Amino acid sequence: MNNFVQAMNLIAENCNITMQDKEKFIAKASKKMQDELSGYNANFAEIFANKVANNGYNSPIEIQNINFYSHCKHHFSPIIGKIAVSYTPNKWIIGFSRIIQCVNAFTKRLQLQEELTVQIAQEIFTKLEAKSVTVTIVAQHYCMQHTPNEALPEIKTVHII
Ligand SMILES: [Zn+2]
């Protein structure tokens, strides 16, 4: 039994989930939890393995509106928002989907928005030896106190290297 299955087993017991539903709940919820925290297993060398030589492109390359869903490491509450990644290449460029894989590797962990912003920027900067990287995140934190009909504020963080 892995740790996620064990954790969901405890939750099922605490929540009085009936025997009939218990097995299904544990199987589905532990799988979901494993996916949501799969970023800890990310292999960045592999994600950036397909970089290709830059042929003199000197301007920023920006990928906008990357939707993400993460969990805050203080409350295990959802953090939901959008990420924009912009990098100015030096020697290397890379496929856009690889940038998104890099973003996912960090969002699928327990996070603080400030740290998430810096981690993504640093990884891309290092792996691509870029001239500069800017990561902008706008997100709502569901651990903030709010009444049901009151919209959560949007928190914006920007990290520039
Ligand atoms: Zn929180």
Image (cartoon, rainbow, N blue to C red):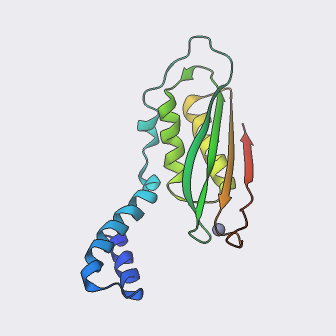
Residue 115 in the image: x percent, y percent? Answer: 65, 54
Residue 110 in view in this figure? yes
In this picture, residue 35 sits left or right of residue 95: left
Q: Residue furthest top?
A: 56
Residue 148 in the image: x percent, y percent? Answer: 67, 71
Residue 1 in view in this figure? no
In this picture, residue 86 sits left or right of residue 34: right
Residue under the image location 44 percent in, 37 percent down: 47
The vertical placement of 48 against 140, above or below, is above
Q: Quadrant of ligand 1?
A: bottom right
Residue 56 in the image: x percent, y percent? Answer: 62, 11
The image quadrant where one finds the C terminus is top right
The vertical placement of 33 against 43, above or below, is below
The image quadrant where one finds the N terminus is bottom left
Q: How many marks?
A: 0
Closest to the observer: 107 or 119?
107
Residue under the image location 46 percent in, 53 percent down: 39
Residue under the image location 49 percent in, 48 percent down: 105
User: Where, by quadrant of the figure, is residue 17 drawn?
Assistant: bottom left
The vertical placement of 1 against 58, above or below, is below
User: Where, by quadrant of the figure, is residue 142 drawn?
Assistant: bottom right
Q: Residue furthest front?
A: 149
In this picture, residue 157 sits left or right of residue 43: right
Closest to the observer: 147 or 103?
147
